[in-house]
Image (cartoon, rainbow, N blue to C red):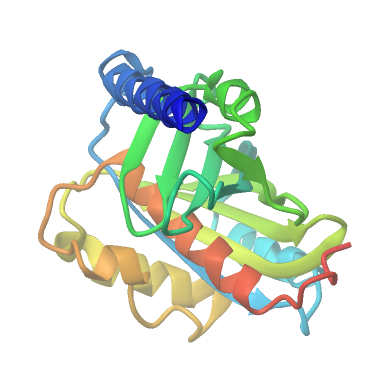
Amino acid sequence: MNLMNKQYENCREISGNFSLLLFLATFLIFFCSIVPKMVVSSVHIVSDFAAGPQMVETFQTNLETLGAKKSGNFLIECDTYYSNSAIFPTQKLLNLLQSSEYPASAFSLIENGSTIVADSSFEQIINNLSNFYSSKKMARIEVRGQKFTLGDFIVKLGSCTMGASFKAVVAEIEYGPCSVPNACWDLIKELGRSFVGPSISKPNQHLLARMNELYSPVDTIHQYNDIFNQIKKQTPQGNTM
């Protein structure tokens, strides 16, 4: 009986330490290098795997015809972790996203729960806590491509892959002089439809719920997270390579 009590106390201590870790990671949000900007971004799947990755070139040509200029590359990465059912009664997924736009930061999105913005070293912390969260046996999912500048717009256009498998073409349309989505959605939609067609018809699900709120960089990450979750649900287990 004493042994069981001791094991129980050990588990409580470990759980408490983990809660403290999450608190400290959350606290790091105040020290992250995320500088709020007066922009609104809308992220969309504009072509699925059936059309093939060559659609990226088609959309790029359309953008350049409109006068857009290449302005660099971008990368969004997502790794998925499972919570340990022996410690957490209800299993939760944790998606860890990193963006080339914010190289010093990591975005941890817990399923139906908190969003933690921390230092990029948070990935190493999670990997060292395999007793709590273990990496899902699924390939990393990412969007990689080029950025274009067109007036007050920045367009990011790239291929979404899971492992070595192409999954979709994703476009992020950022409008500069705006901070409330509802005030500039029509402009974003008009530009999007001018180079990808009618596939851009309404805001991303996350953005749709926040159309009259001040936009922040975390809202962009949530939109990519929604797209990644959608793609993962459509991908049969064992078919990611």
In the rendered picture of this protein, how many numbered marks are placed on residues? 0
- Quarter of the view holding residue 69: top right
Quarter of the image that includes the C terminus: bottom right
Name the residue located 75 percent from the left edge and 57 percent from the top edge.
138
Name, please, the residue furthest toward the top: 31
Provide residue 148's location: percent of width, then percent of height. Answer: 56, 47
In front of the other: 16 or 145: 16
Name the residue located 72 percent from the left edge and 65 percent from the top edge.
56
Provide residue 48's location: percent of width, then percent of height. Answer: 68, 79
Relative to residue 175, is residue 214 drawn left or right? Answer: left
Asked whether residue 76 is in view, the answer is: no
In front of the other: 237 or 201: 237
Provide residue 139's location: percent of width, then percent of height. Answer: 78, 53
Asked whether residue 165 is in view, the answer is: yes
Note whether 49 is above or below 116 in the view shown: below
Name, please, the residue furthest toward the front: 1
- Quarter of the view holding residue 167: bottom right
Note whether 7 is above or below 89 in the view shown: above
Name, please, the residue furthest toward the left: 212
Note whether 173 is above or below 20 in the view shown: below
In front of the other: 63 or 41: 41
Provide residue 184's location: percent of width, then percent of height. Answer: 22, 61
Relative to residue 108, is residue 132 drawn left or right? Answer: right
Name the residue located 42 percent from the left edge and 59 percent from the top edge.
90
Name the residue located 65 percent from the left edge and 77 percent from the top edge.
47
